[in-house]
Image (cartoon, grey):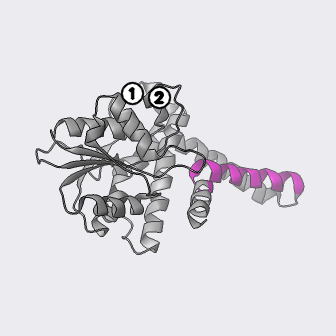
Amino acid sequence: MLFTLKKFIGALILPLPFLLLLMALGLALLWFSRFQRTGKICLSLGWIALLLLSLQPVADGLLKPIENSYPTWQGTERVEYVVVLGGGYTWNSQWAPSSNLINNSLPRLTEGIRLWQQNPGAKMIFTGAAAKTNPVSTGEAGARVAESLGVPRSDIIILDKPKDTEEEAAAVKAAIGDAPFLLVTSASHLPRAMIFFRGAGLHPLPAPANQLAIDSPLNPWERIIPSPVWLMHSDRVGYETLGRIWQWLKGSGEPGNQ
């Protein structure tokens, strides 16, 4: 119950739903109250914020400092395990397998496979419980897609009980102890994940995937026209900032520290 409530409240205060609620409040005040000035302020602030957060320079300017916490793994240290954290997914057996990994999950998996290929004999670990209405777990979905891309089932370990990053860290600790491993997750999520895994007494090697903040060439119009793509990048900033605040409130780590 607490987990569901946390997710619901957290989702409501992410940029898009929060700004839509702010603009809805402004419209309600304009139409149904005498607080016209307050309504205009709410509506104007919501519109301006939504516009700015949908622009590439703003969204990626906010996201880049989070993603740059750890560079892409290019090390030569040998590991016994490659841990790929769960993310968005569904499961439809009629689809191409990889289509079932939504948003951040597929880039995490492909980077995990790249690192697994560089470490012959290593095992891949996929984490994540089942969503409430899905009989297939996050970890199992990742394993099935990895199999479809050539990873033998014998090289896969599934940890399908953890519901969040803190539980994933505890499950990995119980499964592999102090064995060396690469921790693969989205670049924006990795700073928070590293805190949880270190807090569990582990020493993960950080391996970011799914970098989103762009500072390489783009068409000029892509930088000046609002887009849901850039708004999604702003959403990642909001999600991880809320996650770090919650982590700090629980005593797991200070916001801004690694």
Residue position marked by numbered label 2 in the rendering = 222
The amino acid marked with disc number 2 is Glu
Q: Nearer the viewer, residue 216 or 228?
A: 228
Image quarter where the C terminus lies is: bottom left
User: x%, y% of residue 250?
Assistant: 45, 73
Q: Are marks 1 and 2 in contact (CB under 8 Å)?
A: yes
- Residue 153, picture quadrant: top left
Residue position marked by numbered label 1 in the rendering = 218
Task: Inspect this view and state whether residue 211 appears.
Answer: no
Task: Inspect this view and state whether residue 181 appears.
Answer: yes
* Residue extent of the magenta highlight: 12-32
Question: Residue at 41% across / 48% down in the picture?
Answer: 86
211 shown above or below 38: above
Label 1 to label 2: alpha-carbon separation? 6 Å
- Residue 92, picture quadrant: top right
Question: Residue at 82% across / 56% down in the picture?
Answer: 29
Residue 44: numbered disc: none
- Residue 240, picture quadrant: bottom left
The amino acid marked with disc number 1 is Leu
Q: Secondary structure at mark 1?
A: loop
